[in-house]
Amino acid sequence: MAFDNKRPAGTEDLGLTREFGRTYVPLTSGPPRFAVLDERRSRTLTAWADTLVPGDEHWPAASAVGAPEYADATAAGSPVLRAALRRAVDALETVARRQGHDAPFAELDLDRRVTLLRQLETEHDQLFAFVLELVYEGYYRTGRVQDAVYERTGFRPEVPVVGMRLAPFDESRLARVRDLKPHWRSVDEELAR
């Protein structure tokens, strides 16, 4: 599981476990923008997000709901996360060049991008998991995606947080239970014995 503290011996700890939950990014109504990544890196992250969540007729693509910008905004809240996000994007481009691709990751077709992301996950599992978590969090917290979840499954993601209205309870259903003898003894009766 991403960000657990059980790292195999000999693997690098990037310190993301301690930093990941320390930033909060509120939902914004303005246009999404990048604060940490430059234009080249933001194109790579956007293509990465759209490779993870490409979208179809039922689901919007990750970039269509601002998931890459959310990842960037979350990283902006911590120097450790900013460095990790830049490092993750640069590592992906390095993997692409090493595999013989002359074009940037964002210009490759979907099959090549999937192959490169699998290679990145093998070589840099923490960086890959970090971006995966940020993209998924940014994706599934948007209204458009939550509406799609409800339309496809009937599940409302906000219910565990805000609750839901229930029909009034019919107290006459308790009548039989109220008529039962108690299944307990009084402490006073026990002390009197």
Image (tube, rainbow, N blue to C red):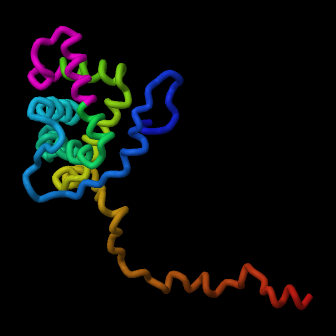
Return the x and y of residue 193 as percentages of the image width and height. Answer: 92, 88
- Taking depth in this image into account, of 48 and 144 the one nearest to the observer is 48
* First to last magenta residue range: 87-111
Return the x and y of residue 42 as percentages of the image width and height. Answer: 13, 35
Q: Residue furthest top?
A: 100
* The N terminus, quarter of image: top left
The answer to whether any part of residue 139 appears in the image is: no
Q: Which picture quadrant has residue 189?
A: bottom right
Q: Which picture quadrant has residue 69?
A: top left
Q: Which picture quadrant has residue 147?
A: bottom left
Q: Is residue 155 magenta?
A: no
- Taking depth in this image into account, of 42 and 47 the one nearest to the observer is 42
Q: On screen, 163 above or below 23? A: below
At 26% from the left and 35% from the top, the residue drawn is: 85
The answer to whether any part of residue 166 appears in the image is: yes
Q: Is residue 100 magenta?
A: yes
- Taking depth in this image into account, of 68 and 53 the one nearest to the observer is 68
Is the stretch drawn in magenta largely helix, strand or loop? Answer: helix
Q: On screen, 33 above or below 156? A: above
Q: Residue furthest front?
A: 79
At 73% from the left and 79% from the top, the residue drawn is: 183
All told, the count of numbered labels is 0
Return the x and y of residue 27 as percentages of the image width and height. Answer: 20, 57
Return the x and y of residue 164 as percentages of the image width and height. Answer: 33, 70
Instruction: Please indicate whether residue 178 sits to the left or right of residue 1 in the image.
Output: right
Q: On screen, 118 above or below 157? A: above
At 30% from the left and 61% from the top, the residue drawn is: 158
